[in-house]
Image (tube, grey):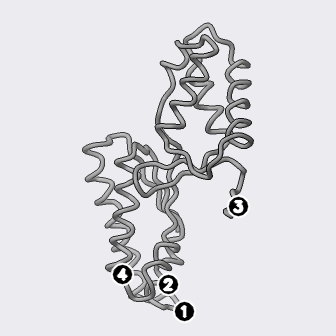
Amino acid sequence: MIALPNELPFIRIGRASLALCQSDWITKTITDAVDGTDVPRWLAEDISRGVEHFLMNHYKGTVIDSDEFFKKIDATLSNLGLQEVAENIDKTPPPVRISLSELARRAGTGYELAFFRLLERQFRSAADGGANRVECHGLKKCVRQLSSAKKWSNRCEQLQSEITLFLNQEKSQASARCPDLNLQICY
């Protein structure tokens, strides 16, 4: 059994990316949709708590597709007579977090080519799935894993630069299809 960090399912974005479904993201998504309508903000917050309750207590999976997630919100809002709010929902999925150290672990020590293939697949899946923010975490740990380095060296510095350059190139290519895509690389 998979232990979920907050009892909410992950949101699948694209074919290979998962995003953490968080309460504050659900609330912001629904409350932003009431802006410019006659619906009070407190009602949007109440609806978001209802969505969370459903996902934690009645949804039978650990992962929900982004499209399915937004269809459920649309249906809920429509059933409540809030079609105008349903039409205002921004269907941008939450940020996708890519663990670079996990990809390095999966690729294996010294298998940089396999690492770059895994990273490319994850990044493109997130971008093609509609993510507007991709956060890559654990760059230094990743570099040490791939290079089997106990101490930071010139080789580590070079590999870190290659990974950063690769991610920036992927972002640049994806920006043609997704101009709002943001990339954050955390060391």
Please name the amino acid that badge 1 sits on: Lys
Task: Please give the label number shown on residue 144.
Answer: 2
Residue 158's place in the image compared with 52, above or below, is below
Apparent side of residue 39 relative to residue 164 in the rendered image (left or right): right
- Nearer-N-terminus badge (4/1): 4
- Nearer-N-terminus badge (3/2): 3
Real-space Cα separation, disc 1 to disc 3, in angstroms: 32 Å
Residue 132's place in the image compared with 159, above or below, is above
Query: Do the CB atoms of the residues marked 3 and 2 lie less than 8 Å apart?
Result: no
Q: 112 or 61, which lies in front?
A: 61
- Nearer-N-terminus badge (2/1): 2
Real-space Cα separation, disc 2 to disc 1, in angstroms: 7 Å
Foreground mark, 3 or 2, reads 3
Please name the amino acid that badge 4 sits on: Glu
Q: Secondary structure at mark 4?
A: helix
Query: Do the CB atoms of the residues marked 2 and 1 lie less than 8 Å apart?
Result: yes
Task: Please give the label number shown on residue 150.
Answer: 1
Query: Label 3: how many residues lie within 10 Å, few (<14), some (14-19) or many (20+)?
Result: few
Task: Please give the label number shown on residue 112.
Answer: 4
- Nearer-N-terminus badge (2/4): 4
Query: Label 2: how many residues lie within 10 Å, few (<14), some (14-19) or many (20+)?
Result: many
Residue at image mark 3: 3
